[in-house]
Image (cartoon, grey):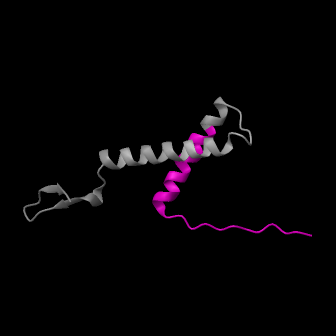
Amino acid sequence: METNKEEFMNLQSSEAVVAKMASTIFASLITQSPLHNSNEDELVEKSIALAIKIANRAEKIIQSDSEWRKDDKGSAFLA
């Protein structure tokens, strides 16, 4: 009797965020076109590519608190 081999992943925080975004995008894509063995890989790749594109765009536009520095006079500037 064969047993299923368990797989474990240790995603970094940013990877986990992109994976969650990709799964949401994937769910949306499969509501528009049915999932088949023939298009599964294509839809997964498309979902991941779109999630990365969104994350990269957000990184360029949004500055988090840790990316701002204060000088000696109390003025804030981007690091």
- How far from the left and from the top, in percent, is residue 70? 16, 61
From this viewpoint, which residue is outermost toward the front? 38
Most foreground residue, 20 or 51 = 51
Query: Relative to residue 44, is residue 78 drawn left or right?
Result: left
Query: Relative to residue 46, is residue 8 drawn left or right?
Result: right
**Which residue does the image show at 72% across and 40% down from the upper left?**
38
| Quarter of the image that includes the C terminus | bottom left
From this viewpoint, which residue is outermost toward the left? 73
Q: Is residue 31 magenta?
A: no
Most foreground residue, 76 or 49 = 49
**Which residue does the image show at 65% across and 46% down from the upper left?**
41
Magenta segment range? Answer: 1-27
Q: Is residue 56 above or below residue 27?
A: below
From this viewpoint, which residue is outermost toward the right? 1
| Quarter of the image that includes the N terminus | bottom right
Q: Is residue 18 magenta?
A: yes
- How far from the left and from the top, in percent, is residue 47? 56, 43
Q: Where, by quadrant of the figure, is residue 9 drawn?
A: bottom right
**Which residue does the image show at 67% across and 31% down from the upper left?**
33
